[in-house]
Amino acid sequence: MAVQKSRKSRSRRDMRRSHHRMEIAELSVDATTGEKHRRHHMTKDGFYRGRQLFKASQDA
């Protein structure tokens, strides 16, 4: 099992983690319904790229 030779400083640890931040999800507007949704995801109505993939359930 590998054992590090010397301890990493707080600075080096934090520099390594600098890109681990949360990113804001990109939003798109559906061409057919005008509803906002996450990129590469369908809308709540079941539309993706202007086409309806399936009927939305009436329970929601």
Image: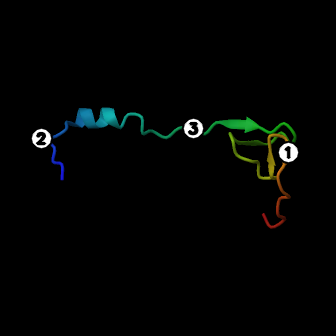
Amino acid type assigned to the residue bearing label 3 in the image: Ile
Label 2 to label 1: alpha-carbon separation = 58 Å
Kind of element beneath mark 1 = strand
Kind of element beneath mark 3 = loop
Give the residue at mark 1: 51
Residue 22's label in the rendered image is none
> Height in image: 45 above or below 19?
below
Query: In the rendered structure, which disc, 2 or 1, sits on the residue that comes first in sequence?
Result: 2
Q: Label 3: few (<14), some or many (≥20) within 10 Å? A: few
Q: Label 2: few (<14), some or many (≥20) within 10 Å? A: few
Residue 24's label in the rendered image is 3
Q: Nearer the viewer, mark 3 or mark 1?
A: 1
Query: In the rendered structure, which disc, 3 or 2, sits on the residue that comes first in sequence?
Result: 2
Label 3 to label 2: alpha-carbon separation = 38 Å
> Total label count?
3
Residue 26, given in percent of the width and then of the height, sits at 64, 36
Give the residue at mark 2: 5
Residue 51, given in percent of the width and then of the height, sits at 85, 45
